[in-house]
Image (spheres, rainbow, N blue to C red):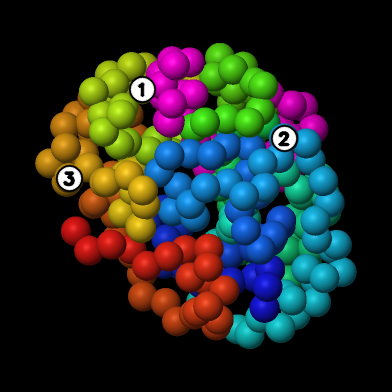
């Protein structure tokens, strides 16, 4: 299968069936993050397009056998919100599964009303924020979009006000932003998410991960907030249907 992969043993979402709404051969993204496990962005894109027709997604989902999963998660080799028909694809998944549906987004397009409207169809939205100011945002995320960090944070805040589901913030910490945890925590307090996921690149990455002790120091800055630390989260055991397709999107985690 080319669009559906996993299940992935997610530290955030348990046994997670992956759905790729873009599914290009190489990474298509609105960012070119320094730490990305998928490497450099081969296809920079800032405007939404239709990549996958709903009938194709429906066909692949019918091939998925009965298995124990906790979530269906829109992710993959690309930024999911670049799919212009994201809402249609969510409806196709709901035809097949009763489990909650999540999406992992880099937040780059959340200033747009049409993107927030599509994201509101999910049960869980995991939105990324990696920097407390514009300079570090450009250094770490290397955006292709014209939106500033201020505009992206405005979009997340507006979504928080509208969204009836669970909003999680993922914050990826690397050497470049490890000393900015206090400021990142203030952003989290302003956005008031249901969960804050403190991450560091444990999968193969051009950037070295921070240590458990360093992540503990960062976690301390988020006192009083609902935090999930990547080093402290449990991962379930899973059996892949197609390991090649899964590893294309989720390389093996490095030993720590």
Q: Which residue is labeled 3 in the image?
A: 211
Q: Earlier in the sequence, mark 2 or mark 1?
A: 2
Which residue shows up at 63% across the image and 44% down it?
Answer: 29
Say above or below: 149 vs 64. Answer: above
Counting from the top left corner in percent of width and height, residue 41 is at 58, 46
Magenta residues (range):
111-140
Q: Residues within 10 Å of mark 2 (few under 14, many from 20)?
A: some
Q: Which residue is labeled 2 in the image?
A: 46
Cβ–Cβ under 8 Å for marks 2 and 1:
no
Which residue shows up at 40% across the image and 35% down it?
Answer: 171
Question: In which quarter of the view is residue 150 placed?
Answer: top right
- Horizontal side of residue 37 vs 96, given as left or right: left
Q: Earlier in the sequence, mark 1 or mark 3?
A: 1
Circle 3: element type = loop
Q: Residues within 10 Å of mark 3 (few under 14, many from 20)?
A: some
Say above or below: 226 vs 203. Answer: above
């Amino acid at each position: 299968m080319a669009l559906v992969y996993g299940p992935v043993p997610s530290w955030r979402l348990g046994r997670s069936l992956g759905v790729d709404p873009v599914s290009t051969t190489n990474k298509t993204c609105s960012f070119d993050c320094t730490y990305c496990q998928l490497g450099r962005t081969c296809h920079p894109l800032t405007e939404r397009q239709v990549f996958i027709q709903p009938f194709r997604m429906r066909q692949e989902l019918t091939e998925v056998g009965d298995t124990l999963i906790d979530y269906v998660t829109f992710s993959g080799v690309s930024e999911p919100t670049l799919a212009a028909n994201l809402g249609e694809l969510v409806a196709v998944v709901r035809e097949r599964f009763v489990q909650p549906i999540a999406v992992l987004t880099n937040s780059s397009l959340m200033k747009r009303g049409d993107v927030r409207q599509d994201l509101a169809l999910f049960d869980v939205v995991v939105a990324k924020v990696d920097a407390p100011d514009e300079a570090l945002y450009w250094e770490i995320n290397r955006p292709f979009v014209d939106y500033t960090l201020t505009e992206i944070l405005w979009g997340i805040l507006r979504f928080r006000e509208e969204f009836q589901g669970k909003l999680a913030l993922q914050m990826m910490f690397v050497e470049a932003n490890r000393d900015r945890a206090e400021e990142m925590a203030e952003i989290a307090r302003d956005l008031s998410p249901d969960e804050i996921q403190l991450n560091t690149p444990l999968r193969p990455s051009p950037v070295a991960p921070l240590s458990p002790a360093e992540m503990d120091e960062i976690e301390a800055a988020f006192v009083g907030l609902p935090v999930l630390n990547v080093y402290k989260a449990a991962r379930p055991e899973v059996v892949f249907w197609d390991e090649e397709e899964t590893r294309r999107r989720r390389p093996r985690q490095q030993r720590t």
